[in-house]
Amino acid sequence: MNEINIIEADFSNDNHSKAILKILNTYAEDPMGMNMPLDDEVKNSLIQKLSHFPLAVSLIAFDGKQPAGIANCFYGFSTFSAKKILNIHDLAVNPSYRRMGIGKMLIRAVEKKALESDCCKITLEVREDNRARTLYEREGFEYGEPTMYFMTKELE
């Protein structure tokens, strides 16, 4: 493993776009993802749509020229703090790079970005059975009081 560099993605950069799609698709195929590849329509439109979404921030971890991991994040807003929030929507590390500290490096890069952006907190959702949950706990993420549930309603 070379030195890991984490950079903010430039959605107009073909190498960055390919890295995001490669890692995200690998994650989607994983049991912690959807256990199947991204839909072709998503693969074909994701980068263009992210590039036009002003609240999107993607960080990519590179091992030399090889993409090792990504953090796809989105800004939100806390009305209780009157400040921005940075939500980690996807945190994914390629299987061949897992257990090497890249997830931790990505979380710390997200934290740095959040501080630079004057955010009051970083949020994320994690499945109960996701083994990365212990990483998040070690990095200071905790269950709020009172315990909150992240609920979804799929729209068709």
Image: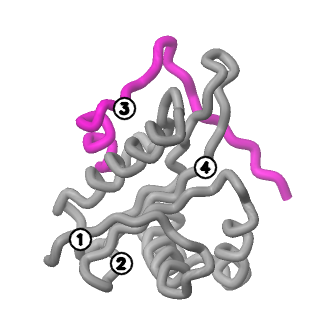
Mark on residue 141? 3
Mark on residue 97? 1
Residue 111 percent across, percent down from the top left: 39, 42
Q: Nearer the viewer, mark 3 or mark 2?
A: 2
Tell me the CA gap for discs 4 and 2: 21 Å
Which of the marked residues, 4 or 2, is nearer the chain's N terminus? 2
- Report the residue marked by disc 2: 67
The residue under label 4 is which amino acid type? Phe
Residue furthest to the top in view is 146
Q: Residue at x 49, y 71 (%)?
A: 24
Which of the marked residues, 3 or 1, is nearer the chain's N terminus? 1
**Which stretch appears magenta?**
131-156
100 vs 50, nearest the viewer: 50
Q: Is residue 150 highlighted in magenta?
A: yes
102 vs 132, nearest the viewer: 102
Q: Is residue 62 left or right of residue 45?
A: left
